[in-house]
Amino acid sequence: MGIDLSKINIKDVDVKALAYEVLSSVKKPNILVIGATQSGKSTLINDMFSFELAEVGKDGSSTTRGIKKYSPHDSTVTLYDSEGYEVGAENEFKQRVFDFIDKRSASGEPEHYIHEAWYVVDGGKKRFFDLDKEIINRLQKKHIPVAVVITKVDKLDTDELAQLREEISKNFSTIDIFNYSVMLGHLPENDRKEYVQKEALANWSLFNLEIALQGGLVCGLNSALELKNKYCRNVIIPKYCAAAAAAVLIPLPFADSMLLTPIQVSMTMNIMHAYSMKNELKDILGPIIGSTFVANLGKALAGNLASLAPGGQVAKLVVNTAVAVPITATLGVAISYLIENYLKASVNANGNVSFEKMFTAENIRKACEFVSNNKELFGIDKLIKKINSDIEKNKNR
Ligand SMILES: Nc1nc2c(ncn2[C@@H]2O[C@H](COP(=O)(O)OP(=O)(O)O)[C@@H](O)[C@H]2O)c(=O)[nH]1
Ligand SMILES: [Mg+2]
C-alpha cells in the first residue's frame, strides 16, 4: 500500500514509563473472606485468584489462624482470610472480626477499609446458623457489601441446596448468593454455571467496587476471561478512545498521527494488565522486546490507518475523531482477542507459547483486520457508538 513506515517515530514512546505507570497506579481492593473453620475459604480463594494464598487444611485442622492478610508483593488484591470460628468460641470470633473492621474504617483512609466481604457458608453443613445471620447483619450495617458463597455444593442434593438458599433469602431478601464447589469442574457447562458460580461471584465483586479499585480485582482474578473481556470493552477501551478523541480535537495529518501511539501503547498495557499478564508487561520493559513491541504496535496501527485512507492514499488522510475512535477501539478489541488466543494457546501447550512470537506486527495487524472484517461478531459498531455517545455526554457536562 506504500505507507512510509519510516515517517512513524515510535522511538519517542517511553514504554518503560508507561508500563511503570500501569503497574504503579493500581489500587488494591481489600476483600474479607469470612466463615466457619473448614468451610472452604482457602480453597475458594486459591481457585478464584491467580496467586497461591493459603495452605488448604488437609487433616481436618485449620491452617489459618487469626485474620490473615494475603498480599503477595505482585498481587493486585489484598485478601483477609478470617480464621473462622470453632464451636464455643463464637463471641471471641465476632469481637476479633469487628474490632479489625472498625480499626480499619477508623483509620479514615479508604485504602485500608474493607471494601467487600464474601461470607462463606459451608454447604456440607446444610444449615444457615444464627451466628451467620448475625455476622452478615452487622457487616451490612457497616455498609460493607456482602456476598454469600455456599461452598461444597457437591455435598448437597438439589433439594437441599434449594432449601439452604431459601433459608438465607428468608433472612436477607436482597442478598446475592453464589454456589461453589471445587469438585465439580468436570460438569457440563450449563450445570457448571449453576453449581460453580465463579464468574458470577467475580462479576458481583467487580460491580460492588468503585471504579478506581476495579482494575486490581480484574488483574488478580484467575481465568475469568469473559469478565476481563467485558472490563476491557466497558472501561479500558472507552477510556483510551476518549483520550485519542481529545488528542485529535484539532485533526492531525497522517504523518503526525503517531502522536496517538503513546495512548494506544498505554491502552495495550492496561489490557495486558487486566488479563493478568503482569510478567509479560515486566518483560517488555527490557529494551529489546520493548522496542519491537512498540514498533509492532506502531506498524499495525499504520496498516490500520492506511486501510481507512481514501483510495489507499495515506498522505491525504486526516486523523480526526471519526478516525481515531474506531481505530483505537478496533485495536483494543484486537489486542484482547490476541491475548485471549495467546492465553488459550498457552493452556493447551502447557505455557510453551512465546509471547514475542505471538505479538508480531503481522499478528497484531491480522487481528485488527479480523476484527474489522467481523464487526458483527465483535460488536464493534455498537461499541463505537456507545463510546462516541459517552464522549458527547462528557463534552456537554
Ligand atoms: N467436598 C468438598 N470439599 C471441599 C470443598 N472445598 C474445600 N473442601 C475441603 O474442605 C476442607 C477445608 O477447606 P479449607 O479451604 O482449608 O477451609 P478453610 O478452613 O475455611 O480455609 C479441606 O479438606 C478441603 O479439601 C468443596 O468444594 N467440596
Ligand atoms: Mg483456611
Image (cartoon, rainbow, N blue to C red):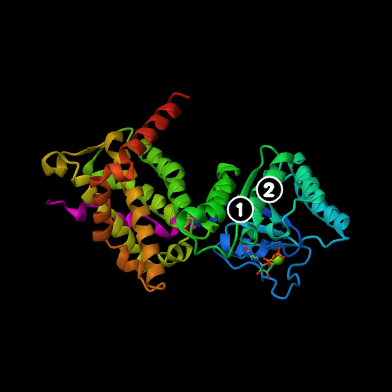
Give the residue type at disc 2. Gln
Principal SS element in the magenta part? helix
Residue 225, how many percent across, how many down? 45, 55
Residue sitting nearer the eye, 180 or 165? 165
Mark 1 element type: helix
Q: In this image, 315 relative to 377: left or right?
A: left
Place residue 337 in its image quadrant: bottom left
Name the residue rendered at 74%, 72% in the picture: 60
Residue sitting nearer the eye, 309 or 332? 332
Question: Quarter for ligand 2?
Answer: bottom right
- In reply to whether residue 4 is colored magenta, the answer given is yes
Q: Which residue position holds label 1? A: 158
Q: In this image, 13 relative to 214: left or right?
A: left
Number of disc labels? 2
Determine whether 249 is above or below 35 in the image: above
Q: Gap in Å between the C-alphas at discs 2 and 1? A: 9 Å
Q: Could one spot residue 251 in this view of the protein?
A: no
Q: Which residues are magenta?
A: 1-22
Mark 2 element type: helix
Name the residue rendered at 35%, 33% in the picture: 385
Determine whether 319 is above or below 396 in the image: below
Q: Residues within 10 Å of mark 2 (few under 14, many from 20)?
A: some
Residue 197, how many percent across, how many down? 56, 53
Q: In this image, 267 relative to 192: left or right?
A: left
